[in-house]
Amino acid sequence: MFENLSERLGGVFDRLTKQGALSEEDVKTALREVRVALLEADVSLPVARDFVKAVEKKATGAAVTKSVTPGQQVVKIVHDELIQVLAGEGDPGALRIDNAPAPILMVGLQGGGKTTTTAKLAKRLKERQNKKVLMASLDVNRPAAMEQLQILGTQIGVDTLPIVKGEDPVTIARRAKTQASLGGYDVYMLDTAGRLSIDEELMAQVEAVRDVANPRETLLVVDGLTGQDAVNTAQNFDDRIGITGVVLTRMDGDGRGGAALSMRAVTGKPIKFVGLGEKMDALETFEPDRVAGRILGMGDIVALVEKAQATLEAEQAERMMKRFQKGQFNMNDLRMQLEQMLKMGGMEGMMSMMPGAQKMAKQMEGSGIDDRLLRQQIALINSMTKKERANPQILQASRKKRIAAGAGMEVSELNKLLKMQRQMGDMMKKLGKMGKGGMLKQAMKGMFGKGGPNPEDLQNMDPKQIEAAAKAMGNRLPGGMGGMPGLGGGGALPPGLSGFGKKK
């Protein structure tokens, strides 16, 4: 969502950091462009104006002029100021749900993604915080709204309040409160009705529900693609209902992202979560420092490491490490790596979190690597027998033909895959031998949280340090990212990639 803003600011700062010394005029020219970039990204005018003023004040001080690298110092100031604009009070994503059953009220306009977000949040509370959650739909206007929440509840394994036709929202809210108390639930979530625009009827209904439930958290769900209108919606809801936080949906879209920057500054309410897609786990905590890093093209290594930890169990990593140290790397290992890449959002999802992602994305386009290629390679491995996967060296020409035909591919594609597996096996062997336990052990630890980079340390680092750490990390991990082909540091493709073919 922040791609255009990223690109514009990247251009401005590239010019700044190339200069040895900075004059006040240089900073003013750069900040003029920053202001235009913010306005084009749909950040509201007062917020953009205040932002530039604050940066200019800090950037023309003596500390910057005397700094060894003034250009980088200005980037750091902009980074810190971005965090200031985006940050709210308290821990992002922390919800006040201490005394059970704690009510959470979900409000917003129609089509903003309230019902889906309710289910995503319930799943998150159940899985991450081990909470027993009850969901109730109060939307008596939209056809099948209640059934939608019921179906989502079944999908994620969270209870929903039984539907009783003909009840009004306030009665349903009372019934949910009683059921939550009797059923021993930690949290009950009330999904209210939305309207196409704010009107008196909607507000009166939500106010009545609020008075009955007395919610611990009132979360406003707004569509990130609506731009400045989302900020006005937040303002109106806060004035009438009193919201405690905002959830921005569709942040994976190609909107202009300025709403996120304006939201906190204008409403004073923190953005707690962001929705990044339709899947039930596509909800992330809104971390201001990470978003600021992404906007300035410093990548989001912390999120990448977290994703890796979530998709690959630490014990499994330990087992893999022992095999790799012995130089064992067969087709089963390769398949596991390729599947993990797809789980983490494929090549594009992973690349978007790497520092300098914009520049790398262009290189990736030229190299012809995409997720279809990963799926084709998995299909080839699946076409082999168990014995062949465990020991690919035994493959004869006739067997190769059968495997390629089974996956609907050419033998040449299979040969490339076999070559890649051999090269990665050799690389694992070398890494395993380096030092006591080797670099491989360090790499695996870094991936799975044992002695790896501490997210807090990364937050306190200078932007350039983060970039350097990320590059080092990319180079340190086997094949780039936990042995996954195609993620070397920087953006140059590592040796393990020579087996990748072009797109057909």
Image: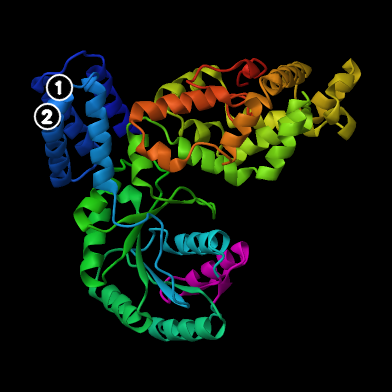
Q: Position of residue 502 (x, y in %)?
A: 61, 18
Q: Is residue 158 magenta?
A: yes
**What residue range appears in magenta?**
132-160
The colour style of the image is: rainbow
The answer to whether any part of residue 379 appears in the image is no
| Cα distance between the residues tagged 1 and 2 | 7 Å
Q: Quadrant of the C terminus?
A: top right
Looking at the image, residue 324 lies above or below residue 231? above
Q: Quadrant of the N terminus?
A: top left
Circle 1: element type? helix
Q: Is 147 left, or right, of 236 in this rendering? A: right
- Residue drawn at (59%, 27%), measured in percent from left and top? 477
Q: Nearer the viewer, residue 53 or 438?
A: 438
Give the crowd class for mark 1: few <14, some 14-19, many >=20 residues within 10 Å.
some
- Residue drawn at (68%, 24%), measured in percent from left and top? 436
Q: Nearer the viewer, residue 81 or 394?
A: 81
Q: Which residue is mark 1?
A: 65
Residue that sits furthest to the left in the current view: 25
Q: Is 397 left, or right, of 493 in this rendering? A: right
Q: Check if mark 1's residue and mark 2's residue have beta carbons within 8 Å.
A: yes
Q: Position of residue 355 (x, y in %)?
A: 42, 28
Q: Amino acid at mark 1?
A: Thr
- Residue drawn at (59%, 24%), measured in percent from left and top? 486
Q: Which residue is mark 2?
A: 61
The answer to whether any part of residue 498 appears in the image is yes
